[in-house]
């Protein structure tokens, strides 16, 4: 079973711009706070659109596993470095257009990220957690699918 997460930025106009991690999305807040502490770093992360998993710089075993999957003959996996972290991506499920292209209330951005019209639209996706960065306060917050407002 996958634990899916939206990772994004709370925009001043009430929209949310983010990416979607479709596996192991639980407990990411400490990694996000440590490695993605500026809007620029977060934008670099979410411009990857959709990814399978993220590994921090000290997650040697997970990074090794990512590389093993990537190096298999005929593999659809790739590893992308983002800052000091690594994303595991899998084609064709590694872009927002493939996963969210026809969804109402979601705009696919040219950089690969997606923008949700509001919190309710983002929170209504097939996800377990949403991690939102508030640029006004430079803080991350975790939401679950049960949360109704932010």
Image (cartoon, rainbow, N blue to C red):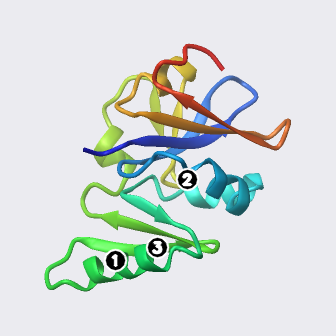
Q: Residue at x 85, y 36 (%)?
A: 136
User: 46 and 101: which one is in front?
Assistant: 46
User: Which mark is first along the chain, 1 or 2?
Assistant: 2
- Image quadrant of residue 142? top right
> Looking at this view, is 47 or 27 the one in front?
27
Question: Of the numbered discs in the image, which one, if any, rests on residue 65?
Answer: 1
Give the residue at x 35% y 46%: 97
**In the displayed structure, would residue 134 be above or below residue 81?**
above
Return the disc, 1 or 3, that comes first in the chain's sequence. Answer: 1
Q: Is residue 125 above or below residue 114?
A: above
Q: Where is residue 21 drawn, in percent x and y?
A: 42, 50
Q: In the rendering, at what x and y percent does residue 28 appear? A: 56, 50
Q: CA distance from mark 3 to mark 2?
A: 12 Å
What residue did someone put label 3 on? 80
Mark 2, residue position:
46
Residue 32: which quarter of the image? Answer: bottom right
């Amino acid at each position: 079973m996958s634990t899916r997460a939206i990772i994004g930025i709370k925009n001043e106009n009430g929209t949310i711009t983010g990416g979607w991690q479709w596996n192991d999305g639980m407990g990411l807040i400490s990694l996000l706070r440590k490695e993605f502490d500026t809007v620029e770093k977060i934008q670099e992360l979410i411009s990857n659109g959709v990814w399978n998993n993220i590994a921090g710089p000290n997650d040697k075993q997970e990074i090794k596993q990512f590389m093993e999957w990537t190096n298999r003959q005929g593999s659809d996996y790739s590893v992308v470095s983002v800052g000091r972290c690594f994303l595991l991506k899998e084609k064709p499920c590694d872009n927002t257009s493939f996963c969210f292209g026809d969804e109402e209330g979601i705009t696919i951005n040219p950089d690969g990220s997606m923008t949700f019209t509001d919190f309710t639209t983002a929170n209504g996706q097939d996800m377990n957690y949403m991690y939102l960065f508030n640029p006004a306060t430079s803080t991350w917050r975790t939401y679950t699918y049960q949360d109704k407002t932010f």
